[in-house]
Image (spheres, coloured by chain):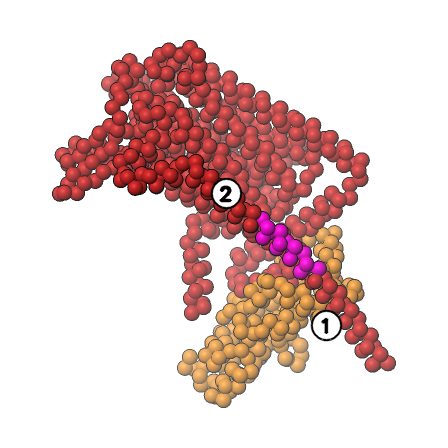
Chain colours: A orange, B red
Amino acid sequence: MGSANSHFTKDELQEYSELTFFTKQEVLHVFEKFVELDQDNVNNDKLCRVSMEKVCQMPELKVNPFNDRICRIFSTSQNFDGSLSFEDFLDMMSVFSDQAPKGLKVEYAFKVYDFNEDDLLDAEDIEMVVSRLTGYAGSLKDDEMQQLLKNIMQEADLDNDDQLSYAEFEHVISKSPDFLNSFRIRL
Amino acid sequence: WKRFKEDSADMLRHVQLWRTSIHEVEGRFGNGIRSYFAFLRWLFILNIYIFLLMFVFVCVPTVAFESLVHSGVNISSNSLNGNNVSAECAYNPYDPNAVNSFSQYVIWFFTGQGFMEKTLLFYGYYSNSATTIFSDGFLFYYDIPLAYLMVAFFYFLLTLVLLVRRAGAGLKESLLSNEDRFYTYCNKVFCGWDFCITDDHSAELKHSSLKYELQTDLEEERIRLRQSSRTSKEKWILYTKRFFINLVVVGILVASLVAIFYAAQYALGNGDTFNNNFMLDLIVTYLTSIVITVANFIAPLIFGFLIIYEDYSPAFTIKFTLIRTVFLRLASVVFLYVVVYLQINCKIRPNCTFCEGVELKTYKCWETYLGQEMYKLTIMDFFIVLAVTLFVEFPRKLIVENCSCGLAKWWGQQEFSIPENVLDIVYAQTIGWIGAFYAPLLPVIVVVKFFIFFYLKKLSLTYNCRPATRPYRASRSGTFFYIILLVGFVVAAFPVVVSVAILEPSKDCGPFRGWTTMFYAITASIQTQPGWLQSILWFVGSPGFAIIIGVLLCLALYYFVALRTAHKKMISLLRDQLTLEGKDKQFLLSRVTKLTKELQD
């Protein structure tokens, strides 16, 4: 704790805690976690970027099938390699914390699931999501996948354009009782 | 603080018996098989409770008072009724001074006769005395017959309460999940993954369970579609098929009951004749158990084979097979009870002359005989399951893996059949409940049996079985097991209640000897209470009180039924509102896109 304190000034901590949903104590805790990811580089320069591979080694993200998507959407790096600076990391943890409001989580969930980044969840995206979900257990057969897609579109696609816009996604997810419990990471 | 609460809830869940094993099973084989093991665990704990009740309140005092008599404490046990039976009719199953061969002892151990009858295991051992201990001005009074009856009453009540709670909770859950027809797929796909999972093993389990759930839902939908698209000609053919198959099922049922009847008669008539031949003796005493177990073994195979032709959805197939097999098994146990009672207690038969109503000198204590039958059934059941697992499933796996001949391919690898296994344990438990009244230490045997079953089944599952090819909805099956158990409970409670209230206990054995009914133990002790308490208790037992309670219950029932209809109407109203809202959104979205297009042009 002592060494972390020396990395930030009081003003910086204040700013971080105002901009995220964390208290100052929690901000420092997140920084500790960040340091663990890549000790040498971060101790030299707290503003450096940690590569995506190292971030995904974190236990909370290691087994997550969407870890690369998460890193990419929070990353502000210029060359789109998914690397995260401390501010990106803090941002990510803040969205996944318990205090973040539902609307914000839904927005980010949409981004995570949108694999081709066209602001729409089409059949391709959903197929990717399902195959990531079934993971090691092997994927569904082709006809099962088609049936599943049809059902999802039937449930969620209100304007019948075979893809889910953000509004449609939000409409479905906000009704779900499990969303808040699933979509969080506790440090 | 919140974290502490969550951690402690987590830890409590960790401490649960066999939690890791069940978790593993869930991951590899799905929810349905998991619910089987959870059910087994629940029954195991229930039996431990029953055993503790019986042991602490009946067995321990009996043993304690006997040993205290010899140790000089001021203790006196008085028989609660003075009837004495003449010498030739006295109950004397075992003469400790006689010399018997070792094989005789072995037979006795397995059939519960001879020296086993004179142990705590059977009803006949317990005395009908009330014991008073004087020590330093303290008066300790303990009435064993009353204790026996009250303990039996309590463990039935306890079982009923726990069972109804469990079945009720499960029913509520399944009703709720049935109502939630909205967005099931979206929910599973988008909110299915729990981002809090941190270790590899849980992640694997989560992946497999998600896959199973999605496949189950899709399969059920396909079947629903197929069922609704049947032409009426197909329907007629199906219905006739079903009718004939049901006739066959009823025929099998009747055939097994008849077989049990003849077996019971033969066993009772010829119990003593083969004194020299050890094996034959054993087989004759075990004859009824053998017949019942064989019938219970073959019939489900036939049922399982037949139900494929009836083309039901997977969930219903399982339920219906369960219902049929349950009916067979429970009917056979009750039938056995009735046959034995009719044979031994000969008040009903016209020409019985000997010894105050008992025809056969060897069966003076019909309760102990019943206890012995239950004991034999339990043991036989255990050995059969053990034998099937070891000698059928293991070789099957070896054959299928190593030899690639046509027979192996047709037989296929073993699939864990949930209905049968659930029924095995429900049946074992029903026997346990009936038997617990006539053989107070039978719950221990059942506890040990279930313990061994758990590991045996888990082993068999892991090594021999492949995951089910027909995934099915698990949570509803879980509730269904408890409902079947409730049926088993009623079937078990009924004979015991009848025997307590109506049947006459044996004259010379057990805690209720000499009275007209077993229930007299309670009336006798009521008569020793102060006057005001007596009149209250008499009122509670009278028909007037029962009528009042009945009327109140009917009113409460009517109220709840009315509430339920009102809620259902509310639910459908709200559903319609939701669809309307969805349509509104659709309309607004299309307007928005139109306007943005116009703005862009």
Q: Which mark is residue B551?
A: 2
Q: Residue at x 17, y 43 (%)?
A: B138
- Residue range corresponding to the magenta coloring: B560-576
Residue B379 drawn at (x, y percent)? 43, 29
Q: Residues within 10 Å of mark 2 (few under 14, many from 20)?
A: few
Viewer-side residue, B438 vs B15: B438
Residue B300 drawn at (x, y percent)? 59, 31
> In the picture provided, is B410 more to the left or to the right than B584?
left
Residue B205 drawn at (x, y percent)? 56, 54
Q: Residues within 10 Å of mark 1 (few under 14, many from 20)?
A: some
- The main secondary structure of the magenta stretch is helix
Secondary structure, mark 2, is helix
Quick check: is B566 in the magenta stretch? yes
The quadrant holding residue A121 is bottom right
Q: Which mark is residue B214?
A: none
**Chain letter of the residue beneath label 1 in the structure image:** A
Q: Which mark is residue A119?
A: 1
Viewer-side residue, B151 vs A112: B151
**Chain letter of the residue beneath label 2 in the structure image:** B
Q: Are marks 1 and 2 on the same chain?
A: no
Q: Residue at x 32, y 21 (%)?
A: B507
In this rendering, which labeled residue sits more in front, label 1 or label 2?
2
Viewer-side residue, B112 vs B497: B497
Q: How many marks?
A: 2
Residue A159 drawn at (x, y percent)? 78, 66
> In the picture provided, is B63 more to the left or to the right than B548?
left
Can residue B115 be seen here? The reply is no
Secondary structure, mark 1, is loop
Which amino acid lies under the numbered mark 1 shown in the image of this protein?
Asp
Q: Residue at x 67, y 65 (%)?
A: A172
> In the picture provided, is B103 more to the left or to the right than A40?
left
